[in-house]
Every structure is written in C-alpha cells, then in structure tokens.
C-alpha cells in the first residue's frame, strides 16, 4: 500500500484464494497492520460469452446451436427422422406419414393411382392399399395393363359387298354392319325386293 504512487510501499498483503464465478456473493477481506487497515471486496466474473466454474465454456447467444432434432432461429421447429421420405413431425425425430404413404420411413406408396395416374384412355385405376400395386379397368375399345391398346372390332368381320363394318360398343358385339339401301341383316346378307317385299330366309351367297 502506498500513500502516494511514487512513494515506497508501506503495507503489503498477499492472499491465495480459490474463488468461483458461479457465486453471487461479494467476498470481503480485511487486513490490519498497526494503525493501517485495508479492506478488499472481491467478486469474480467471467469475460463476455464465457461461462462455467472456470470460465472455460464459450457461448455466444448470437450463434445459436439447437439441440438434436430441432431447428429454426428459435430452435422450435422439429426435424423429421433421418430417411423420412413422405412424412412430417410434431416432435423431434418423428416420421408421421402423409396420406397414402406408409412404412417406417413413409416410403411405401399405398395409393399408386393417386401419385402416378397410370391408366390411359379413360381407364379407371384401383390400388387396393398395397405397395406399388394397381390395376386398370378399361373403357370399351381398349385393352392392356394401362389400357394403352385400342381394339379394332372390325378386323375379322365380313359385312359382305353391301355393308361396311363400324365399331359400336353399345351393340353387344362391338360392331355393326351398315348396309346399303337394298340390303339388311347382321352381315347385310338379305336383299329387299323392288316392290318392298322381303326375300325371306334366303341368304345371298353370291354377295360373299
């Protein structure tokens, strides 16, 4: 202790203390020597952004690091389980499947029709709730797994010399023979007489 900065020390006090910045108390130490008396008031505080009993832990609030499974500026947004494909979470590391998806990682397509629309040409798709499974119910005139092939019902139909084959799915046979004005019948095999009487029961084999 000096009375003035440039004068000799007239009082020295040394203490070895183990103090913790975790304590909120202010330590008071009093030293006396003769008529001299010194009082110390000591409180240990860590530097800015340093914490812990030895001020060895660094934490800058402006540099956030969320706990595992959480994200966002306030660490209040959950992360889905790693590998989750078509799911969401309400808490950390969940994988809750969206509609029409299943499996641990929501990677099983339970409604192939909804996600892919494989049936063509007006075909109706059905999935049955099975993974990657579907079948198509085709409209008249189409066949194939995806209803991709058009049927020509007239390929093997003979309407004779007096008729023309026309597709007609409502007819029951898938076709009709459109006859000229002088003939009639399923294959235009009958003739109408000029006096509008019908030649009954006689097939006109000469037309085939």
Image (tube, helix red, strand yellow):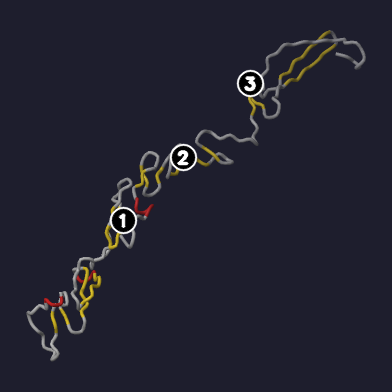
As helix, strand or loop, the secondary structure at mark 1 comes to loop
Q: Sequence order check: which comes first, mark 3 or mark 1?
A: 3
What is the total number of numbered labels drawn onto the structure image? 3
Tag 3–tag 2 contact (CB < 8 Å): no
> In screen coordinates, is 5 left or right of 22?
right
Tag 1–tag 2 contact (CB < 8 Å): no
Q: Which quarter of the image is occupied by the C terminus?
A: bottom left
Q: Which residue is mark 2?
A: 80
Q: Which residue is mark 1?
A: 146
Which residue appears at 30% of the width and 59% of the height? 149
Which residue appears at 63% of the width and 21% of the height? 53
> In screen coordinates, is 4 left or right of 141?
right
Nearest-to-viewer mark from 3 and 1: 1
Query: Would you place residue 183 above or below residue 114 in this image?
Result: below
Query: Would you place residue 64 above or below residue 125 in this image?
Result: above
Circle 3 Cα neighbour tier, 10 Å, few/some/many (<14 / 14–19 / ≥20): some
Tag 3–tag 1 contact (CB < 8 Å): no
As helix, strand or loop, the secondary structure at mark 2 comes to loop
User: In the rendering, at what x and y percent does residue 48 appear?
Assistant: 70, 29
As helix, strand or loop, the secondary structure at mark 3 comes to loop
Q: Sequence order check: which comes first, mark 1 or mark 2?
A: 2
Query: Would you place residue 98 above or below residue 158 in this image?
Result: above
């Amino acid at each position: 202790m000096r009375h003035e900065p440039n004068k000799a020390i007239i009082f020295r006090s040394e203490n070895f203390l183990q103090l913790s910045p975790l304590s909120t108390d202010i330590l008071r130490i009093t030293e006396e020597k003769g008529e001299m008396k010194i009082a110390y008031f000591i409180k240990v505080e860590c530097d800015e952004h340093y914490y812990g009993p030895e001020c060895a832990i660094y934490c800058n609030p402006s540099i956030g690091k969320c706990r595992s499974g959480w994200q966002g500026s306030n660490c209040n947004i959950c992360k889905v389980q790693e590998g989750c494909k078509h799911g969401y979470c309400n808490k950390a590391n969940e994988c809750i499947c969206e509609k029409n998806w299943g499996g641990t990682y929501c990677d099983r397509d339970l409604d192939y029709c909804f996600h892919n629309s494989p049936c063509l040409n007006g075909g109706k798709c059905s999935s049955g709730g099975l993974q990657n499974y579907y079948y198509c119910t085709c409209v008249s005139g189409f066949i194939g797994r995806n209803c991709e092939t058009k049927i020509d019902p007239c390929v093997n139909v003979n309407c004779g010399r007096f008729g023309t084959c026309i597709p007609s799915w409502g007819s029951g046979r898938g076709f009709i023979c459109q006859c000229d004005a002088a003939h009639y019948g399923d294959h235009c095999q009958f003739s109408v007489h000029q006096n509008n009487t019908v030649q009954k029961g006689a097939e006109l084999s000469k037309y085939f």
